[in-house]
Amino acid sequence: MKKKFAIIVCVVLAVLIGSFLWVRGQIGITDPARLLPENTAFYAALPDVPRTALRWPKTTLAKIGAEPEVKEFLAKTKDALTKNPGTHEAGDILWKLKPGRFFAAALPGEGASLHPLLGFQYWGGQKSFDEAMARLRQQIAGGAHVEPTRENHHNVEIQTLSLPDGTTLCSATLNRWGLLANNPEALKSVLDQMAGRGSRPSLAENLRFNEAFTKLPTAPDFLAFLQTAPLLDALLEAGKPLSAQVDNDQIEMVRAAQAVAFAFKLDGANFRDAVFVLRPAPPDLGQLQHSGLSLTSPATLGYFSFLLQFEALAKLPAYSTLLRQYLSTMSDGTDPLTRLTKTLGREVSLAMSWPEGRMIPEFLAAVSVKDPAQASEFLREAAAIFPESTRTKTGEAVLYSFPTLRSAFLDPTLGLSDNLLVAGLSPDAVEGAFQRGSGSSTIKDTPAFAGVLPAFQSANECFGFINTRGLFERVFPLVRQVAMFGSSLLPGSSQWVDLKKLPQTETIAQHLTPITYAQTRLPNGYLIESSGPITMNQAALAAAGAGAAFWGPKLFPSHR
């Protein structure tokens, strides 16, 4: 009996090992970076789509989307997106193809040229791949059926679509990888690497690639990598026929950053992204001291602190044309930038709060002061430009107000103490910042800040914090009131959403956590990290998109 059991176990193990080896032979290489040449200029990948799908339900956005009020509000949006026949067709193609990984790359060609390449690993079988490629070629050809030319490369068929307008699309598949390129030679080099015939080093063996990604989160949901030199050379080559002007100083600054790596991860409830700029021996600007933290209180909703590189201002066109001319009227003949660097420190702080009853938030900006006497003289000269400006002593600080700049909502004010130069939108805000003093509670003492202390302590060049829940609780009720009566201001919005079904503020706010941003200077470059229900980069893009949507039609009206 024991002998029979041992034989059965051996047979099962043999079948499992054989199955594993067969599947492994069918799959081949799973890391796209191993398929690409070492000098690949750009690489981006979704490394594991099923894993990302499993992580998504845990995120804050997914939990907000699962709220019944939100589902009801977005019902029209969902219907509008899914009623398009093209959406269903694309969904059917992807369902049959079952892609698990995607990547895109720019491969080096002759001279400084680059060739784009797309790839995806799929589990739907050869037939599904052929159908997807046939539909893609038909779409590119404007709906017409164009038969591709076929070429055999080491028993792998390469199909090439060539259109009269110069469009070229090459496709091939091997080991469940689908590949698309506009150059057959680029496609062949990847096929050879996939089949084990390539002898060149791969991107996965690139020292810069590995050095950069050791600083970023492991197992990301999206990653990207670019090498500066080949991309810059390609851009410069493309600009030659246009006689584009080149600033050699700026070119050298860009070349100093040898590579840039990016990783995005669904990290529990939060989104997390990180960027590492590989730049050996970056300039040492000093260490953040957070001197402007005294501007904040427990009610502060946003706080930023960063080191300003004054030397970089001199290279900006705006400085030479505007700032230099303005500051030169207040100086004693010395270079205005030199005077600023002797007077002010590098650290700049920004704080934002939104008191109850105010229609707009309050902003404060502060810069550290190295020479109080020079700073005081600088402010006197600046105030002299506005004859009606007033100077008021309050405690150990001096406040400057400018009546000619005053409006119904704004009363710009400057304040100066021995260690800070503060600018605000009202005298009360600036005076309150000085009165709080070093012993007062700040945003750092709030429960919302407790979870971001590691980022606050590690960042040495830039730190940012947004109390997302507090800010949302201020903004959304105003948006909600306007939206209830504003459907007429947004023609066509009723086809996408029912503005009268906007969720209650607390339905969304209960899920929100703070957004943090941290930039750290390392011996070999810069590490930039952000996390939250959305990251700082995503928030900036969303704000830019909202601004473009609102102001675009006003700035660029259509002419019919």
Image (cartoon, rainbow, N blue to C red):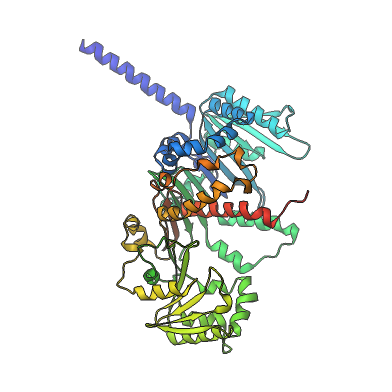
Determine whether 125 is above or below 53 in the image: above
Q: Position of residue 550 (x, y in %)?
A: 62, 53
Q: Please name whichever residue, 11 or 253, is drawn nearer the observer in this view of the structure.
A: 253
- Extreme residue toward the front, this view: 485
Query: Which residue is pictured at 63% across the width and 71% down the height?
Result: 317
Is 287 rendered above or below residue 213?
A: below
Label total for image: 0
Quadrant in which residue 300 is drawn:
bottom left
Which residue is drawn at the image coordinates 57% and 42% (left, top)?
Answer: 104
244 with respect to 59 (left or right) = right
- Percent coordinates x, y for residue 60 in the rendering: 41, 44
Q: Estimate the x, y position of residue 531 in percent, counting from the top left.
A: 42, 52
Residue 187 sits in quarter? top right
Give above or below for 286 relative to 220. below
Q: Is residue 152 visible?
A: no
Mark yes or no: residue 147 visible: yes
Residue nearest the observer in this picture, 423 or 493? 493
Image quarter of the N terminus = top left
The picture places residue 248, in percent across and down from the top left corner, at 63, 67
Above or below — where is 449 with respect to 403?
A: above
Along the viewing direction, whichever of 508 and 216 lies nearer the viewer:
508
The answer to whether residue 522 is left or right of residue 35 is left
- Most extreme residue toward the bottom is 332
Q: Would residue 480 be found to the left or right of residue 291 on screen? A: right
